[in-house]
Amino acid sequence: MKLDRIDLKILDLLQRDATIPLARIADRVGLSQTPCWKRIQKHEEAGVIRERVAILDPEVLGLALTAFVMIEALDHTSDWRESFLEAVERFEEVRDLYRLAGRYDFLLRVVVRDMADFDRFYADLTAGVRLRSVDSFFALERMKVSTALPLAGMLA
């Protein structure tokens, strides 16, 4: 999908605040409301805009521990990977899952209340699927978090 400057400006505004009124978006990108709304709908239909959500503060909600779990696969068969993905899907605590190149095969971002919750998660994960190795790293402080994609470079 080819995106022009106006599309990128609309997307940048929406990714920073999905509640921004259509009239304000249209004004900021130099369009009237109808063509602006049509562009937004086009991006939703094409899957560029996947969803509009509220971003919650985990610490305010008592989810103070973030762990990055590095997984080394037991083997690299499609059957093993399928069973691993099925196991991980059952855990609400797993917020992100990435397949990696290098020593580790997968990276999980896990959000829980505390170390006891993480220990339960770890026990359930390792009981549910055979893994070659698991290394866990615990975040001490969230120093920068952003859900916004770097669109400014695409505007140049």
Image (cartoon, grey):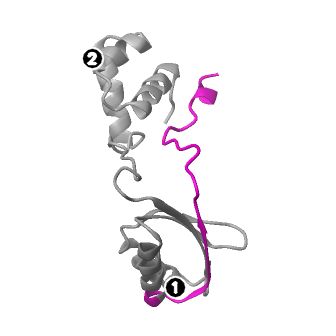
104 and 8: which one is in front? 104
Q: Quadrant where the C terminus lies?
A: top right
Amino acid at dot 1:
Trp
Question: Closest to the observer: 55 or 5?
Answer: 55
Q: Residue at x 59, y 23 (%)?
A: 155
Residue, x 32% and y 42% (percent of image)? 54
Q: Position of residue 111 (x, y in %)?
A: 44, 63
Residue receiving disc 2: 34
On screen, 84 above or below 109?
Answer: below
The residue lying toward the viewer, choosing from 4 and 30, is 30
**Labels in figure, total:** 2
Q: Which mark is residue 80?
A: 1
What amino acid type is highlighted by mark number 2?
Thr
| Observer-nearest of 84 and 145 | 145
Q: Secondary structure at mark 2?
A: helix
Q: CA distance from mark 2 to mark 1?
A: 50 Å
Residue 18: mark in rendering: none
Q: Which quadrant holds residue 72?
A: bottom right
Question: Label 2: how many residues lie within 10 Å, few (<14), some (14-19) or many (20+)?
Answer: few
Residues in magenta?
127-156
Q: Is residue 83 left or right of residue 75?
A: left
In reply to whether residue 15 is colored magenta, the answer given is no
Instruction: Tell which circle, 2 or 1, labels the residue nearer the N-terminal end.
Output: 2
